[in-house]
Image: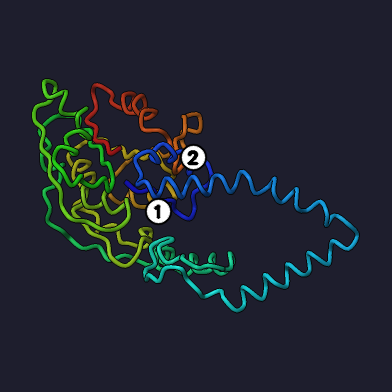
C-alpha cells in the first residue's frame, strides 16, 4: 500500500493518512521515522549551535549562509537524485535543490491545472454500469464510489466488500466486476451516470447541455422522478456546480450546504456517514426520487 499527498492538501490531511503507515513497505516506514526524528531533533540542535553566534555580527553569518545557498541553487538546481519523467502531481519532483516558487509555477502550468480551463470532448462509451441493473422501484439510490479500483487478489477484494456480502439476506442480488479506467474522480460519475468519457479538459460549464441528454438523471427526470445529486465535497471542484444540473439533477447537495456536518480528511468534505440522515430525509414517501452519493 502506498500513501499519496496531493499538492493542495494540508498538514491535517497528512495526519489523517498516518494510520495507513502501518501497512506501508518497511523502507517507507523507516524513511518516515528518519524524517520525523529529524524534524523533532533539529530545532534543538539549531538552537544550541546558534548561541555562540548570537552577537552583533550575526548578520554576517546570515549573509554568508544566504550567499552559499544562492550559489548552490544557481549551480545545482536542475540536479535530480532520481531521473523520471511525468507530470502527475509530484512524480517528477526529485530535485536535490529547487525553488518553491519555481515549483509553484510548474504546478500552475501543468496539464492537470490547465485542464480546468479547457472545454472537454464528451465521448460515448459502452460499459456494464451498475445503473443498468435498476428495477422498477419508485425510489432509486445510486452510490458511486469514484475510482475505487479493484484488488489484485479475489480474497482481498472479498475482504474489502465483506460488509456487503454479510448482508446477502437483505439484498436481491450482488454483482461485481471491473473495467480499465484512467482520469479524475468526476470521470467515474460521468461513466456511471452518462456512459461518457472525458477528453481534453474539465470546463463543464462550457459544454452544451445536449451532450448530457442521455444521462441517467435526465432520463429519470423525464419519467417523473425528482432527481437529487449529493456529493460530500465542495461544488466548485471539477465544476460539479455546473455539471450536476446538466446531467439532470434538479436539486444538488454539497459540502457548503451543510456547514454543521462533521468533516473528514483528506479533502475536508462531509464524512460519508454524515450524509445518511440527509439521504433519509430526502426520500419522501409519495415522490419518485433518484440519488447519487
Q: Tell me which label, 1 or 2, sits earlier in the chain.
A: 2
Assess disc 2: are there few (<14), some (14-19) or many (≥20) residues with their C-alpha within 10 Å of its C-alpha.
few
Q: Are marks 1 and 2 in contact (CB under 8 Å)?
A: no
Residue ID at (31%, 65%): 120
Residue ID at (40%, 51%): 4
**Left or right relative to 273: residue 194:** left
Residue that badge 1 annotates: 239
Check the image and name the residue furthest to the right. Answer: 56
Q: Quadrant of residue 36?
A: top right
Task: Name the residue nearer the viewer: 217 or 89.
Answer: 89
Q: Quadrant of residue 100?
A: bottom right
Residue that badge 2 annotates: 15
Task: Name the residue nearer the viewer: 51 or 186.
Answer: 51
Assess disc 1: are there few (<14), some (14-19) or many (≥20) residues with their C-alpha within 10 Å of its C-alpha.
some
Say which element carries label 2.
Answer: helix
**Left or right relative to 157: residue 109:** right
Say which element carries label 1.
Answer: helix
Relative to 40, does residue 79 appear above or below in the rendering? Answer: below
- The spot of residue 76 in percent (x, y) is 57, 76
Amino acid at each position: 500500500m502506498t500513501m499519496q499527498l496531493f499538492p493542495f492538501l494540508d498538514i491535517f490531511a497528512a495526519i489523517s493518512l498516518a494510520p495507513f503507515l502501518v501497512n506501508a513497505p518497511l523502507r517507507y516506514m523507516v524513511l518516515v521515522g528518519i524524517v520525523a526524528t529529524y524534524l523533532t531533533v533539529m530545532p534543538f540542535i539549531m538552537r544550541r549551535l546558534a548561541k555562540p553566534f548570537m552577537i552583533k555580527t550575526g548578520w554576517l553569518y546570515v549573509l554568508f549562509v544566504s550567499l552559499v545557498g544562492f550559489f548552490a541553487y544557481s549551480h545545482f538546481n536542475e540536479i535530480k537524485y532520481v531521473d523520471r519523467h511525468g507530470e502527475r502531481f509530484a512524480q517528477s519532483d526529485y530535485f536535490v535543490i529547487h525553488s518553491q516558487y519555481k515549483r509553484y509555477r510548474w504546478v500552475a502550468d501543468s496539464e492537470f491545472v490547465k485542464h480546468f480551463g479547457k472545454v472537454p470532448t464528451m465521448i460515448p462509451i459502452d460499459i456494464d454500469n451498475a445503473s443498468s441493473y435498476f428495477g422498477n422501484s419508485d425510489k432509486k439510490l445510486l452510490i458511486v464510489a469514484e475510482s475505487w479500483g479493484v484488488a489484485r487478489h479475489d480474497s482481498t477484494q472479498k475482504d474489502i466488500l465483506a460488509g456487503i456480502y454479510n448482508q446477502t439476506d437483505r439484498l436481491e442480488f450482488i454483482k461485481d466486476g471491473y473495467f480499465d479506467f484512467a482520469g479524475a474522480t468526476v470521470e467515474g460519475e460521468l461513466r456511471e451516470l452518462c456512459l461518457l468519457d472525458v477528453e481534453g479538459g474539465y470546463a463543464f460549464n462550457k459544454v452544451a447541455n445536449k451532450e448530457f441528454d442521455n444521462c441517467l438523471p435526465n432520463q429519470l427526470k423525464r419519467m417523473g422522478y425528482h432527481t437529487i445529486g449529493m456529493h460530500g465535497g465542495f461544488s466548485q471542484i471539477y465544476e460539479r456546480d455546473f455539471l450536476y444540473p446538466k446531467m439532470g439533477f434538479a436539486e444538488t447537495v454539497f459540502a457548503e450546504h451543510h456547514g454543521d456536518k462533521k468533516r473528514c480528511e483528506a479533502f475536508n468534505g462531509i464524512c460519508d456517514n454524515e450524509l445518511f440522515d440527509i439521504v433519509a430525509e430526502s426520500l419522501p414517501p409519495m415522490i419518485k426520487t433518484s440519488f447519487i452519493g
